[in-house]
Image (cartoon, helix red, strand yellow):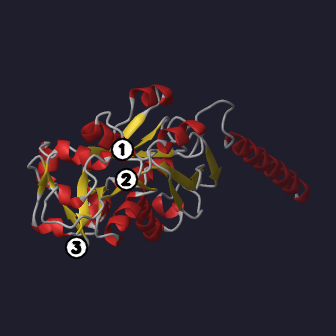
């Protein structure tokens, strides 16, 4: 009897083991089949690739997003980037599918001309501009070209607030501005005889900046800028030079001007004051868009940061930097 019980016990154990092995085999995903446990395919996840670790899925991203170009947009993107980093710290806090790597929003400025070129060279993810994108640049960037408009800006014709002209004149026409910046009008008393015979110090952006192109198109129209004009590497530097010199004049950006109201005075141009209303309705004509571009589809991390730029927080930072939000 004991031998019969043992025999049946052995047979039962063998059957259980066979069933167990068959069940483990069925847990393997079929070759070329659909991903299991709700895993997303490359077409479902931006940037294409995923790695599964148990029930957790990680999207491969580059933890650094690099913007390059316009010195006018650079401080805005840098400020938004700092807020984004402070709020989240690591990418997994933005999206649980992202790796737990530190967020790095890198911003470098070298002028609007560097923006599209840095994207083409692959040295930056996004190119920043404070002017319209040229047709040739769009063509070079190719079919993947996308433009993101951040703000409206203008070039204010600004002087030092201590300049005696502030109490005498508040409006300059385009022709007079052109003569000042070309050097044809070289002394302040040529604008008003009651002023001192002091040389007008002209301050401009360097020629790689978007402001130089906007000023050429809207004011100079082929007339050369004075050879004595002082070139500045950024809008911040331009405004600082006007603030330092009582007899200087320059085309300070609207955002920079609003951040230096205690030291700068802006003229009306052809009767239009550089206000938000006049910039938006077009009556103040020396204006420009502020934007960034890319030449491919965004990956998951890039999309998350772009969404943050165009959020209420991003809008607030655009306003704090003195610009008129475009969203």
What x and y, as percent, mark residue 190?
Answer: 19, 55
Q: Is residue 128 visible?
A: yes
Label 2 to label 3: alpha-carbon separation: 20 Å
215 to the left or right of 277: right
Q: Earlier in the sequence, mark 2 or mark 3?
A: 3
Q: Secondary structure at mark 2?
A: strand
179 to the left or right of 172: right
Label 3 to label 1: alpha-carbon separation: 25 Å
Q: Which residue is tagged 1?
A: 225
What x and y, as percent, mark residue 280?
Answer: 15, 47
176 to the left or right of 57: left
What x and y, as percent, mark residue 229?
Answer: 39, 53
Residue shown at 22% from the left, 48% from the top: 177
233 to the left or right of 191: right
On screen, residue 12 above or below 91: above
Residue shown at 23% from the left, 55% from the top: 157
Q: Which residue is tagged 3?
A: 162
């Amino acid at each position: 009897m004991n031998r019969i019980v043992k025999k049946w016990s052995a047979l039962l154990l063998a059957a259980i083991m066979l069933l167990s092995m068959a069940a483990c085999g069925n847990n393997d995903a079929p070759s070329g089949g659909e991903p299991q446990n709700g895993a997303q395919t490359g077409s479902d996840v931006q940037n294409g690739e995923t790695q599964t670790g148990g029930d957790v899925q990680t999207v491969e991203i580059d933890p650094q997003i690099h913007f390059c170009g316009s010195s006018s947009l650079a401080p805005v993107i840098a400020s938004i980037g700092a807020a984004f980093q402070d709020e989240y710290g690591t990418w997994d806090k933005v999206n649980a599918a992202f790796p737990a790597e530190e967020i790095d929003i890198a911003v470098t400025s070298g002028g609007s001309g560097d923006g599209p070129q840095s994207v083409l060279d692959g040295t930056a993810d996004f190119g920043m501009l404070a002017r319209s994108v040229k047709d040739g640049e769009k063509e070079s960037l190719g079919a993947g070209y996308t433009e993101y408009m951040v703000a409206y800006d203008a070039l204010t014709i600004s002087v030092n607030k201590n300049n005696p002209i502030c109490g005498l004149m508040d409006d300059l026409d385009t022709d007079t501005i052109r003569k000042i910046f070309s050097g044809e009008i070289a002394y302040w008393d040529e604008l008003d005889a009651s002023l001192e015979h002091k040389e007008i110090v002209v301050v401009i952006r360097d020629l790689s900046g978007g402001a130089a192109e906007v000023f050429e198109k809207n004011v100079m129209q082929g007339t050369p800028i004075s050879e004595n004009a002082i070139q500045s590497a950024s809008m911040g530097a331009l405004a600082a030079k006007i603030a330092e010199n009582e007899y200087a004049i320059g085309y300070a950006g609207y955002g920079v001007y609003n951040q230096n109201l205690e030291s700068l005075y802006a003229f009306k141009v052809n009767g239009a004051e550089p206000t938000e209303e006049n910039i938006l309705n077009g009556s103040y004509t020396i204006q420009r868009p502020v934007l960034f571009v890319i030449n491919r589809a965004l990956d998951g991390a890039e999309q998350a940061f772009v969404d943050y730029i165009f959020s209420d927080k991003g809008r607030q930072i655009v306003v704090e930097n003195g610009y008129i939000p475009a969203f």
